[in-house]
Amino acid sequence: MAHQWQGVIEEYREWLPVDEHTPVITLGEGGTPLVHSAWLSGLVSGDVWLKVEGDNPTGSFKDRGMTLAISAAAGEGAKAVVCASTGNTSASMTAYAARAGLTPIVLVPHGRIAAGKMAQTVMHGAQVIQVRGGFDECLQISRELAEQYPVELVNSVNPMRLQGQKTAAFEIIDALGRAPDVHVLPVGNAGNISAYWIGFKQYEKGGLAERTPQMWGFQAAGAAPLVLGKPIADPETIASAIRIGNPASWLLAETARDDSGGRIAAVSDEQILAAQRELSSREGVFVEPASATGVAGLLAAVESGDVEPGLTITVTVTGHGLKDIDTALSGIDSIVDSVIDVDVREAAAIAGLA
Ligand SMILES: *Cc1c(COP(=O)(O)O)cnc(C)c1O
């Protein structure tokens, strides 16, 4: 084999807080495609690229941070790791913990995890604890467990997570040969927007880019504490991965927004689901609802005349559509359009070929 992508630790080692003693726990994460969108480029009269993070090993960008967090935990001799999750963090943590031989403990909101994510978590061998509460309460318990018991917390409050996740910004600049003018992404617990900002700034400081992009973050309207400027007790949105009322990286996200001259705004669940469908049917990119939030936000910005022409815009679509097929299919009346006998002419007639 001429070359195989080595995962983000080996590919970006000099930019990361690792040394030669750090065990590298990897599934080959990162190196995800930057896919040009003719549809969105036309709408903004510029160039729009999708950073397709559903192509990571467990189907979301969480793997970039988890390879760092689990490698560091293993290097420090941890025996167990814990996280609160709306589903993707647990899917990722348990996969990497399995490789490292660490015991994974997962706290999730009771009954509110998409089936695909729960299947991943269970298959990787986690002890799953369902909490009668939301993500924010799960994170509170996880923090207390890590303070009081011999278990390492790997939510994005663990600085290793953001260090790993910043590599997506490096990849975007490496692929484009420049920084984008605007980078767009969904915001939930706000770790990822903070991580991208770290990455974009480091490449600029290191002379690998001449500028940093404006950071445009989008939250779901029912879970938009950063837009409202205060925590929300009962966040509600169909986009479960960003159903978070009190983001852990609140201040870092505000810094990313303000220092970059960007914005954090809200979009409705209807806008999110519409963007999800358009991405699937126009671009062949099937993402979970939360992952379409950035595209929904960009579409709203175009509509309100907030996007000047000629820009290069990158949009992170954060996780794979197969993780939450119930939500995807719930918007469709009938899965099987037509049932016929074994008859080619009938098939042709229904398909509009004859
Ligand atoms: C975690 C996650 C988000 C939100 O990222 P934050 O860092 O919490 O802001 C968005 N989409 C998907 C698919 C996720 O898994």
Image (cartoon, helix red, strand yellow):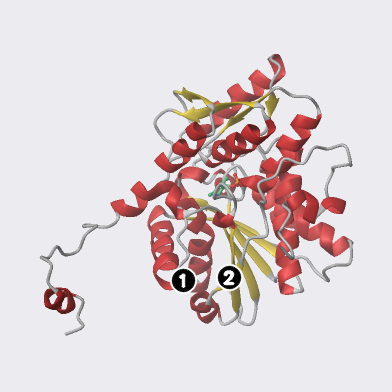
Does residue 57 appear in the picture of this structure?
Answer: yes
The residue labelled by disc 1 is 283
Residue 223 at x, y = what percent? 49, 44
Residue 319 at x, y = what percent? 53, 52
Q: Quadrant of the C terminus?
A: bottom left
The residue labelled by disc 2 is 35
In the displayed structure, does residue 310 sit left or right of residue 134? right
Q: How many residues crowd around disc 1 within 10 Å: few (fewer than 14), some, or many (20 or more)?
A: some
Against 284, is 257 above or below?
above
Which secondary structure lies at badge 1? Answer: helix
Give amino acid for label 2. Val
In the displayed structure, does residue 202 sit left or right of residue 138? right
Q: Quadrant of the N terminus?
A: bottom right
Decide which of tag 1 and tag 2 comes sooner along the chain.
Answer: 2
* Cβ–Cβ under 8 Å for marks 1 and 2: yes
Residue in the image at 80% along x and 37% along y:
23
Q: Nearer the viewer, residue 58 or 291?
A: 58
